């Protein structure tokens, strides 16, 4: 059983794997001052890390609160006993790390938007050529392609996904097509 320490920040859940020091001391020392932490068995973590930034846990009944590195070192150097705490035990298994589906959708949409942005560079370049050549049909086709790429992040496949697994494979058709083209070029 490998235990990890987790705490939450504005950017998401931070995980630490204790080494050398006992886990309860690592938590006190390395978790920021006043932040609640939990001890979680690594089997309680989602096996797929694709939506890692959408992980959440319930910190309403934490295993402890960080005192920060400086306070821990001061207590250690001066021989002051750090508040006695029980040896680290994994938090109850009903407090597994969960994936916040709405946050995962935001993350997935942002990834799709970044990919679409790369493809848009090529469309914009071709649009300039079409404008220079006064090729109206090409300009119209490229406008349509451009709109599809811009709208890809709001594709119904993404918006209607019911599970992280469905969301992970929710790739808009326009993005799939560009991926295929890039694999053949």
Image (spheres, rainbow, N blue to C red):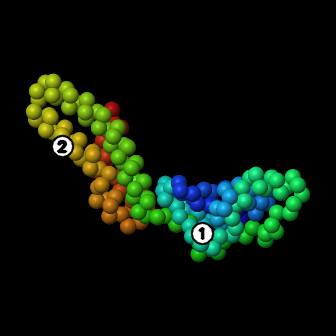
Residue 17 sits in quarter: bottom right
Could you tell me which quadrant the C terminus lies in? Answer: top left
As drawn, the residue found furthest toward the right would be: 79
Badge 1 element: loop
Circle 1 Cα neighbour tier, 10 Å, few/some/many (<14 / 14–19 / ≥20):
some
As drawn, the residue found furthest toward the top would be: 132
| Identity of the residue drawn at 48% across and 56% down | 51
Q: In the rendered view, would you say 49 is above or below 85? A: above
Label located before the other in sequence (2 or 1): 1
Q: Is residue 96 visible?
A: no
| Identity of the residue drawn at 57% across and 57% down | 9
**Residue 122 image point, x, y percent:** 29, 33
Query: Viewer-proximal residue, 171 or 67?
Result: 67
**Residue 19 image point, x, y percent:** 76, 54
Q: Is residue 61 visible?
A: yes
Residue 142 sits in quarter: top left
Q: Are marks 2 and 1 in contact (CB under 8 Å)?
A: no
Position of residue 135 in the picture relative to residue 127 (left or right): left
**Residue 164 image point, x, y percent:** 43, 62
| Identity of the residue drawn at 25% across and 35% down | 123
Q: On the image, numbered disc 2 is attached to which residue?
A: 144
Q: On the image, numbered disc 1 is attached to which residue?
A: 59
**Residue 108 image point, x, y percent:** 40, 53
Badge 2 element: helix
């Amino acid at each position: 059983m490998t235990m990890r320490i987790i705490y939450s920040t504005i950017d998401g859940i931070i995980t630490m794997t204790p080494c050398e020091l006992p886990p309860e001391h690592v938590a006190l020392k390395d978790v920021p001052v006043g932040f609640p932490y939990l001890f979680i068995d690594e089997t309680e973590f989602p096996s797929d890390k694709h939506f890692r930034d959408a992980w959440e846990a319930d910190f309403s009944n934490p295993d402890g609160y960080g005192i920060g590195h400086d306070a821990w070192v001061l207590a250690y150097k001066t021989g002051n006993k750090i508040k006695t705490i029980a040896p680290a035990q994994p938090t109850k298994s009903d407090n597994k790390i969960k994936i916040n589906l709405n946050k995962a959708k935001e993350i997935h949409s942002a990834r799709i938007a970044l990919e679409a942005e790369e493809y848009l560079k090529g469309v914009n370049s071709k649009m300039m050529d079409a404008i220079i050549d006064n090729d109206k049909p090409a300009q119209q086709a490229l406008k349509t392609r451009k709109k599809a790429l811009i709208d890809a992040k709001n594709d119904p496949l993404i918006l209607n996904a019911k599970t992280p697994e469905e969301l992970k494979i929710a790739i808009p058709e326009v993005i799939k097509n560009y991926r295929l083209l890039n694999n053949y070029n």
